């Protein structure tokens, strides 16, 4: 029987197409990560936040992959920091779903909100978790209002979450140095450097004129992105 891995991705639905509206490419990374786990022989369950009331709350994607879309707050797209308001609901729902799915080998959490949920799951169910943080709150605070309520919630939650994490996956030595500098509570053996790379053979020239990308980007600004 394949071992089970859960992928928590509460910023983006990994099955949303990139480049539409406010969506970027983060969900493509999560989708490919899950696909790689399946190819390696694991059973994969995605958990994301319902961002559109028309979507299915649960879908089976073949015999070894599935997705839960959890109802937490207003079912619309939210920027990453806005998800702080939904953390308690996400913790409760995810813990319940995962309890019914035990045994689970490990959890991969994307972004700090998912990490807080994964830390709660670890406390409750003793499931180890890996975090891909994408950013570090203390490093960002110098660039935003330090009294912003979302930043304050992150500051309150992030240190304990990082300490509880089994491994923090960083893509560059610079990210590793940021973690060490801003979070002395992190141990060196928690930091796992997984260098970012791409396979240039997978890319080809866009069939449309290059300025179409500029138009898409301009449309995002027009929508208030």
Image (cartoon, grey):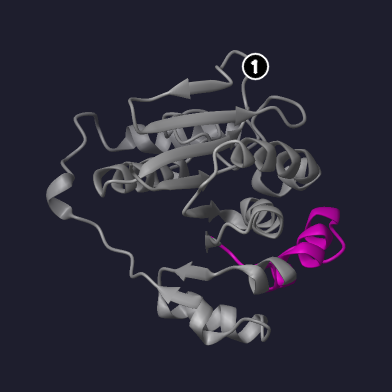
Is 215 placed above or below 24 here?
A: above
- The residue positioned farthest toward the top in the image shown: 54
Of 141 and 87, nearer the camera is 87
Left or right of residue 50, residue 27 in this image: left
The residue shown at (51%, 70%) is 167
Magenta range is: 134-159
- How many numbered discs? 1
- Which secondary structure lies at badge 1? loop
The N terminus sits in image quarter:
top left
- Residue 53 spot, x, y in % from top left: 65, 16
- Residue 123 appears in view: yes
Nearer to the camera, 20 or 70: 70
Give residue 81's position: percent from left, percent from top.
71, 49
Residue 224 falls left or right of residue 154:
left
Residue at numbered disc 1: 53
Looking at the image, which is closer to me, 113 or 143? 113
Residue 224 in the image: state x and y as whole percent. Answer: 65, 35
């Amino acid at each position: 029987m394949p071992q089970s891995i859960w992928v928590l991705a509460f910023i983006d639905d990994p099955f949303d197409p990139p480049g539409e509206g406010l969506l970027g490419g983060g969900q493509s990374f999560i989708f490919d990560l899950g696909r790689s786990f399946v190819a390696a022989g694991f059973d994969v369950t995605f958990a994301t936040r319902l961002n559109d009331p028309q979507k299915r709350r649960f879908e089976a994607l073949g015999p070894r992959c599935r997705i839960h879309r959890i109802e937490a707050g207003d079912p619309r797209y939210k920027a990453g920091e806005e998800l702080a308001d939904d953390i308690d609901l996400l913790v409760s729902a995810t813990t319940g779903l995962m309890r019914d799915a035990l045994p689970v080998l490990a959890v991969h959490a994307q972004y700090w909100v998912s990490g807080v949920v994964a830390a709660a799951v670890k406390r409750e169910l003793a499931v180890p978790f890996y975090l891909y943080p994408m950013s570090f709150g203390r490093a960002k605070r110098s660039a935003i209002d330090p009294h912003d309520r979302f930043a304050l919630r992150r500051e309150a939650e992030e240190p304990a979450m990082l300490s509880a994490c089994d491994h923090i996956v960083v893509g560059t030595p610079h990210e590793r140095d940021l973690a060490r500098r801003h979070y002395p509570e992190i141990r060196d053996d928690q930091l796992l450097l997984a260098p970012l790379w791409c396979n240039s053979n997978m890319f080809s020239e866009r069939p449309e004129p290059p300025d179409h990308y500029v138009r898409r980007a301009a449309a995002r600004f027009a929508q208030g992105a």
